[in-house]
Image (spheres, helix red, strand yellow):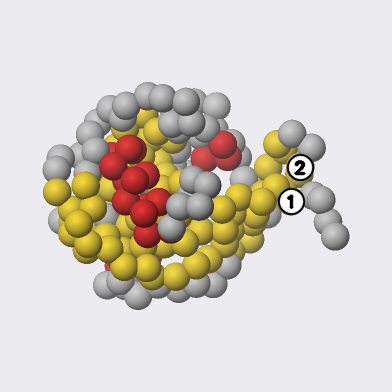
Amino acid sequence: MSTKFHQAFGVYGILSENGKLAVIKKTGGPYINRYDLPGGTPEDGEEMAHTVVREIQEETGLTVTKAHQLGITGFRYPWQYEHWQLNQHRCVFYWIDAWTGQLADQAAQFTGQDALGAVWLPLAEISLTTCSPLVVKAAETVRQHGQFDPTEQTFTDWTVLTKPVY
């Protein structure tokens, strides 16, 4: 069994309106200084549907009132982290059908919080240069009217940004 890959797992929400996607300003991990989807890792014993609701509230200030799971996919790419050389990020995507509240440009900060706040990012501005692969996948799903492609992706190059794009 290979020990080259760091294993990451998370649950993420796609919130879209008026040709824009709700994204967070990421402050940690391989997507640091890029836009990422709101979401994260389930807490001990937490159901995935609850995870996505909690994470969206914590990172964007929005309260999810209706959501459904789209599917699971994964992303693999080089990432030098501790003793690992590669990252394998498995992601469960949820389509957020309804929510209340206003997007928070600043997120509450606490131990474990990896978002500065959230913005509505126009679909036309989404690329791997400024966004995580999750955001690119979400934009593709929005453009396909909610049709989710679970095909996993491997990137031969991945640059961890040292300066924020936001």
Amino acid bearing label 1? Phe
Q: Residue at x 36, y 29 (%)?
A: 116
Residue on which the image places disc 2: 84
Residue 89: quadrant of the picture = bottom right
Asked if the residues shown at circle 2 and circle 1 are in contact, with their CB atoms under 8 angstroms apart, the answer is yes
Up the image or down, 98 lies above or below 3; here it is below
Give residue 109's position: percent from left, percent from top.
Answer: 37, 24
Per the image, label 2 sits on a secondary structure element best described as strand
For the C terminus, the quadrant is top left
Kindly identify which numbered label has been placed on residue 5.
1
Mark 1 is surrounded, within 10 Å at the Cα level, by few (under 14), some (14 to 19) or many (20 or more) other residues, namely: some
Real-space Cα separation, disc 2 to disc 1, in angstroms: 6 Å
Give residue 144's position: percent from left, percent from top.
Answer: 32, 72
Mark 2 is surrounded, within 10 Å at the Cα level, by few (under 14), some (14 to 19) or many (20 or more) other residues, namely: some
Per the image, label 1 sits on a secondary structure element best described as strand
Q: Residue at x 32, y 57 (%)?
A: 14
Q: Residue at x 50, y 72 (%)?
A: 150
Q: Residue at x 43, y 58 (%)?
A: 48
Residue at the right extreme of this rendering: 1
Q: Is residue 127 left or right of residue 31?
A: left
